[in-house]
Image (cartoon, coloured by chain):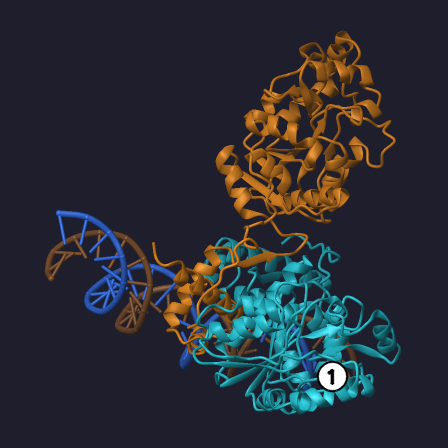
Chain colours: A orange, B cyan, C blue, D brown
Amino acid sequence: MVPADTAAANELLAVRAAELYYEENKTQDEIGAILRVTRWKVGRLLAQARERGIIRIEIVHPRARRLALERELTARFALNDAVVVPAPSDDVELQSRVAEAAADYLVSHRPVPRLLGVSWGRTLHQVAEALPVGWSTGVNVVQINGGVSLSKRPGNAASTAVMIAQKAGGQATLLPTPAILERLETKRAIEGDRTVSGVVQMARGASAYLYSAGVADTSSVHVDSGYLTPADISRLVERGAVGDVIGRYITADGTIADPELDARTLGLGLEELRASSTSILVIGGEPKHAVARAIVTHGLCSVLVTDEHTARALLGHPDDTHDHDLATTVPREDAS
Amino acid sequence: MVPADTAAANELLAVRAAELYYEENKTQDEIGAILRVTRWKVGRLLAQARERGIIRIEIVHPRARRLALERELTARFALNDAVVVPAPSDDVELQSRVAEAAADYLVSHRPVPRLLGVSWGRTLHQVAEALPVGWSTGVNVVQINGGVSLSKRPGNAASTAVMIAQKAGGQATLLPTPAILERLETKRAIEGDRTVSGVVQMARGASAYLYSAGVADTSSVHVDSGYLTPADISRLVERGAVGDVIGRYITADGTIADPELDARTLGLGLEELRASSTSILVIGGEPKHAVARAIVTHGLCSVLVTDEHTARALLGHPDDTHDHDLATTVPREDAS
DNA sequence: TGCGGTTGTGCTCACATGAGCAGACGGTCG
DNA sequence: CGACCGTCTGCTCATGTGAGCACAACCGCA
């Protein structure tokens, strides 16, 4: 090992070089003159400084992305694509940034889907709102799971699909049925109806899907809408449900939590989602980590749009927030 | 004004370009290919991004400095030099970083002083400790104001001067008298003593001075050492004293707060300090802002070593801590 | 419609920079 | 003591990048 002296002296030099280069915009040559080293050494000092994390470059913008995490996610989970936005401290802000990112993704995604299958919920509604008018031309939209019109929340199932379609100058086809039926026979009957089966059939043929997921707890829209009772949720949680994907509750293993309930759930099946070449999952926020993991690890989505905390949780990374433990290194060097 | 659309679209493009350039290390040419613009436009986007503060480059290192502030300080207060260190949250840490910076400055300062006049106190002692052994060769040190040997604190006046001299292989000349005498006659008598007057004479001939300053409150070393009582301090404060420089209490106007007291204070005078071409003030921490301002605005120091908060306070800058108000700008742009 | 003024564009050219390489240095081990 | 090895140094050369410039597009204004 080289004498510690030299290493420390170099570190200090590197700091000085970095200051002159990045804060004073001097050329490496000029810096060399000041620090009395050759310009090549200055270049090397700067390289070292970057490596060791002495120089921290950050892109501060609400629309910035975390490309490194995106790359890791696509690699690890065999995704076609991933979008990771930096997480603001505020949770509401986080949701809208993720939604915005999803909108951006949709706008620039090629090939443009001929027919887009969408689910509904708070997240999806935000995505719809974030889409600019004229985001595309002639994209038709089909609803892929049963929806609510009785929702108290602004933006029910129908309006989400309609808004997305309208803004692209396309038509929306709705699935005007409950999400979950009380009795299997009723579900079968409705499913048998020509109009309904036609929509489901159309949904199966969509060239891309855009959906979010819910958490298995009483804050779920399913409870709000009256499709499920808090007791139903408790039962699902007991069976290991972590959340729902297009109305179907799954466990951490990516399997249906309650087949009987699932049979009464109307709309596209998980297998169709899995088989699709473009299924875009939009999901963010701490409570949804578990569902996100279930979906992503079991191939239910091909594109993931999320926030950086969720991304890190999925990858099993510590949520370090840039602590390159520099404050601890307080070197001391000799006179020159 | 250009359509807001274009501006927003460019901002987003700039963000994407910045990500690819700084996080992914792509060349501007490659980025151009990805974003479908020419490489010159990429260059301009990056320049914009830097200007607007979308890209934040920070040098995170305990020994980093704030060159921009240093430049401003030297310009505003006609200093020969300034050293500003980034302020850590911890106050103890701050003191030691400022001291370290002062030591660094002393080590690399040219011309090397033949004889260095030093004051004493907590700060100066830390500077002495931070100096590396052999920081220079043959620098002699002379104490410029009366000191304490009775101090309870580690590192009294004598040891500070001695340590600085020893580490440079030079000799220390001490001023072994009280800082402030009770009676004017006693002060005159001591001053008349050949040994004492010799030292003061020597101090006047120092080629550089290194000193700190104290706050006018009861935490002062002068109170601790028994030279002043809390009542004395109260009286000084009433007269507008903000702190002491080499034992002499001054007001915000840079004048002696209490001439009678000052006459009983032994050591170098303020005018000698002001006249010196190299008088290095080492000062940091919120409580000392007022003294620092008094010293700096009245030409008592030619070199200032401090922390960034003090620097900003002196310059009247808001202590913004990098808030380029970006989080508020949430643009929206059209499809391409 | 025509016309300055302003803004944005693609380019040339000179300069700044990183990759790669031969030699120097300094320590280790036979 | 000298051969060896890893590291650091200063260099050449190819490439990346910013300044400056001419021109095009577009604005308001007559």
- In the rendered image, the residue lying farthest to the top is A185
Label 1 marks which chain's residue? B
Q: Would residue A286 appear left or right of B108 to someone viewing this image?
A: right
At 56% from the left and 44% from the top, the residue drawn is: A110
At 72% from the left and 49% from the top, the residue drawn is: A132
* Percent coordinates x, y for residue B39 in the rendering: 49, 64
| Residue on which the image places disc 1 | B265
Q: Residue B315: tell me if it is visible.
A: no
At 59% from the left and 56% from the top, the residue drawn is: A58
> How many marks on residues?
1
Q: Would residue B96 appear left or right of D28 to someone viewing this image?
A: left
At 76% from the left and 16% from the top, the residue drawn is: A234
10 Å neighbourhood of mark 1: few (<14), some, or many (≥20)?
many
- Front residue of this view, candidates A39 and B151: B151
Tag 1 secondary structure: loop
* Percent coordinates x, y for residue A239 in the rendering: 68, 13
Q: Residue B68: tell me if it is visible.
A: yes
* Percent coordinates x, y for residue A106 in the rendering: 63, 43
The quarter holding residue B220 reads bottom right
Q: Would residue A44 appear left or right of A123 to someone viewing this image?
A: left
* Percent coordinates x, y for residue B321 in the rendering: 70, 63
The quarter holding residue B312 reads bottom right
Quarter of the image containing the N terminus of chain B? bottom right
Q: Vertical placement of A44 versus C29: above or below?
A: below
Quarter of the image containing the C terminus of chain B? bottom right
- Front residue of this view, candidates A52 and A325: A325
Q: Vertical placement of A64 versus A113: above or below?
A: below
Q: Which amino acid lies under the numbered mark 1 shown in the image of this protein?
A: Thr
